[in-house]
Structure formats: structure tokens, C-alpha cells
Image (cartoon, helix red, strand yellow):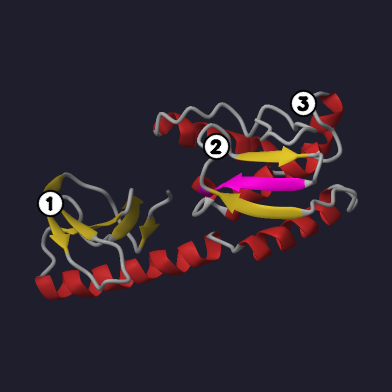
Amino acid sequence: MAAQGARAAGGDPVPTTARPVAHDLPPVEVRRSARRRRTVTAFRDGGTVVVCIPAGFTRAQERVWVDRMVTKLAAQDQRRRPSDEALARRAAELSARYLGGRARPSSVRWVANQTTRWGSTTTADGTIRLSDRLQGMPSWVVDYVLVHELAHLLEHGHGDRFWELVEAYPRTERARGYLEGFATARDLPIADVDDGADPAAQLPG
């Protein structure tokens, strides 16, 4: 995921510190850099929050900045992890804006069992499912996957007509590049959003 920064430059890492936090917060790893002077950045590495600070920071400064960056990441995550209800509302807004309101899913929800696709649509019942791997990604990337799946309610395959619908969303190419880069960097078996909508009950893929 994208790192949160408070200013600065990178540097060579020096010994790291694992820092325990409250029960409702993720574990934190503090990485000190000898070349880092003023900048503090934070990012997630799996279930751990990694906070990069200058090697010269005191323990008191470390505590202040760790708390600040963990709070900032949590706020960012809250914005980027909408509920199923918020996801459905966003899908309706995107349909109205880019598809003339013609794509009307019966439900839109997050799922955890999609490991080879970002989203899927079953046209028989109008359901759309998004991989929870998308949670935490920029909202414009999630919007692209939603538009992609909404378009499948109107066009089942990935033909010219389908892409005409999808490309009404102005950040289509940028979002596709982001997802491709994300999957490649993490060696994920995901080539594109899906393999086309399936009118049957099985998950399209």
C-alpha cells in the first residue's frame, strides 16, 4: 500500500525495533535510518505497521511519531475501506455518472475468497463482489473495478462495446496500470480485473 509521509528522504536502514501497541492496534516495527534527517514515513507490511524515522530521534520522539503515524494510517484506512453499504452506494453513483444509470446491481459486497481476480459479477442475479485485497487502495482504483463490474451487467464479455462502457471512466488506464503493478510486485496470480461476466450462478472470473 502507499506509504504515509510527514516529510523527508529515505536512507540506509539501521537496526529495527518491534514496538508493542494497544490490543486494538496492529504491531509496529520502527526502522531507523542513518541517512534520514527529518522525514518520517509509515506503511503496512502485511499485518505490521512499519514506521521509518531518523536514526537520531530520541525514544520520546519515536513514541510521538509512531503514535502520530499509526493514527494517520488508521484514518486513511477508514476512508479507503468502505462498508458493503457504502460500496453499493458508490456503485449507484458511478452507474449514474458513467453508465447512464443503466447498470443496477442487486447487491455489491466485499469478499475474501477471490484470490485470482479483483472483482466478479453474476449477471443472472445482478450481484457484484469485490476482492477485499482492494481495501486500502486509492478510491479511484476501487471505482475503476466497480465500473468494470457494472459494465458487465450490460455487456457480458470483454468486447469493444464493453470497453467503450468502461472507458467512460476517465482513470481506467491509470487504474489498470496500478493494479497490474501491485499484482506484479507481490507476485499475485491476477492478470486483470476478471475474465468476463458469467450469466450462470458460478463466480465469473
Q: Which residues are drawn in magenta? A: 127-132
Element under label 3? Answer: loop
Mark toward the start of the polypeptide (2 vs 3): 3
Q: Nearer the viewer, mark 3 or mark 1?
A: 3
Q: Position of residue 194 (x, y in %)?
A: 65, 32
Question: What residue is pinned by disc 3?
Answer: 158
Farthest residue toward the front?
Answer: 201
Using the image, determine if residue 38 lies above or below residue 108. Answer: below
For residue 53, side relative to residue 92 (left or right): left
| Residue visible at 67% across and 44% down in the picture | 144
Q: Is residue 72 above or below residue 181?
A: below
Res. 169 visible in picture: no
Disc 1 residue type (three-letter): Ala
Residue located beneath label 1 in the image: 34
Task: Quote the CA–CA distance across marks 2 and 3.
Answer: 18 Å
Residue visible at 70% across and 53% down in the picture: 108
- Considering the whole magenta stretch, tell me its main secondary structure: strand
Name the residue type under label 2: Leu
Assign a secondary structure to mark 2: helix
Residue nearer the viewer, 95 or 123 = 123
Q: Is residue 136 magenta?
A: no
Across and down, in percent, residue 91 comes to 74, 55
Visible residue check, residue 95: yes
Answer few, some or many: residues within 10 Å of disc 2's Cα (few below 14, many 20 plus, some between 14 and 19). many
Q: What residue sits 66% from the left and 64% below the top?
A: 86
Q: Amino acid at mark 3?
A: His
**In screen coordinates, is 159 left or right of 33?**
right
| The image quarter in which residue 36 lies | bottom left
